[in-house]
Amino acid sequence: MIATSSKLPGTSSSIFSVMSQLAAEHNAINLSQGFPDYDCDPKLISLVADAMKSGHNQYAPMTGISSLRTLVTDKINLQYGSDYHPETEVTITAGGTQAIFTALTACIQPGDEVIIFEPAYDAYAPIIKSLGGLVKSYEMAPPDYRIDWEMVKKLFTSSTKMLILNSPHNPTGTTLSDEDIRALIKLVKNNDVLILSDEVYEHLVFDGEKHRSLAMYPELKERTFIAASFGKLLHATGWKTGYCLAPENLMKEFRKIHQFNVFSVNTPMQVGIANYLQDPSVYLGLADFFQQKRDLFRNLLAETRFKLLPCKGSYFQCVTYDHFSEEADTAIAMRLITDFGVASIPVSAFYMRNTDHRVLRFCFAKKQDTLEKSVERLMKV
């Protein structure tokens, strides 16, 4: 056998793959992985099919087709009062994770420190480690998962290169507040620290609140990569299309990596999406659409033994169970699949140290019937 040296020796299959596979094996309702169980708009599918029939089947430009880049920057500039340029400050990517991977690869050198806020999307830390970077984690805790920015400040050293923020947050459903933004601006003032802002759930903010994109704040925008996802916006996660926004000097470095990574992204889908998003109601109505699902799911779960945690955004609902069980979250998550037929994600999987607060995450981007059947089973726990 040929000897190899792993760049990620402690890394195995992601918790999403593990739980989804177990759900399939046990015929469980899958509320673990974050994808809808309903289809996207037939009109969108028709527009992509029309693009294929019209001959849009060869390589797209490396940066993305012009009409989609223009649509993205017009949308962002209008929503957030920003001034991104479609030619130099946006690149279409193969999903949000590829945008994150590329931004990190463009900037992180061996020995650079990157601050992440845990529980965190499980891609952040492995990517940083594979680049020779050092992960410095700030651990948030339930029920509110708030950030103590004075403690974050203590994580800063001369080697701090970047912070990764995620709002609305996966897995907790929290969002950045005005107070958070003010503290962040103060924290990065007079230094060269970069920010990677994961905003894939930007349109899923509830109860009349507004998404605080870092594109809104000039002091932050000048140092920030913003990663976004069309999959979340269009109920089409399997299409793996997204984009990255950044100031021109940062985007130049991003594109150097992007061109040797995927080079370009699925052409007919770019054309179809550009035509579909001419109607702003497609994304402006998402908050109401998902709030109805959130409210339904929370009302149903309130009848179970689980205790609801706040959910201000995203399409994830977290619950605690420590008042009736001392089981590890991984153990109870497995038991929910095998004994009750419902798949969730143990939130300890989002901490590098597997910190266990006895919290589970459920995805509510599902049909009403799916949510109702799931809770019928959870009532028996």
Image: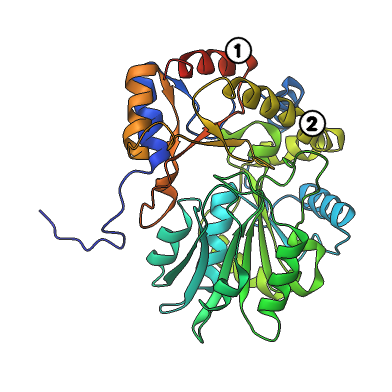
Three-letter amino acid code of the residue under disc 2: Asp
- Residue sitting at x 52%, y 63%: 116
| Mark 1 to mark 2 CA distance (whole Å) | 19 Å
Foreground pick, 98 / 121 = 121
Indicate left or right for 147 with 129 as reference: right
- Say if residue 162 shows up in the picture: yes
Residue 381 on image: x %, y %: 41, 20
Residue 206 drawn above or below residue 262 = above
**Residue 272 screen position, x and y as percent:** 74, 34
At horizontal 54% and vertical 35% (from top left) the residue drawn is 34
Q: Position of residue 174 (x, y in %)?
A: 64, 48
Residue matched to label 2: 288
- Residue at mark 1: 369
Sooner in the amino-acid sequence: mark 1 or mark 2: 2
| Residue furthest left as drawn | 1
| Vertical side of 83 occupied by 331: above or below | above
Q: On the picture, is 316 further left or further right than 283?
A: left
SS assignment at label 2: helix
What residue is at 77 percent from the left and 47 percent from the top? 68
Task: Look at the image and tell me whether residue 279 can be seen.
Answer: no
Q: Which mark is residue 319?
A: none
Location of residue 127 by image quarter: bottom left
Where does the image place residue 165, in percent across and percent down from the top left? 61, 60
Dot 2 crowding, Cα within 10 Å, few <14, some 14–19, many 20+: some
Task: Categorize mark 1 by other alpha carbons within 10 Å: few (<14), some (14-19), many (20+).
Answer: few
Residue at 33%, 40% (x, y): give it.
Answer: 328
The amino acid type of the residue labelled 1 equals: Asp
Badge 1 marks a residue whose secondary structure is: helix
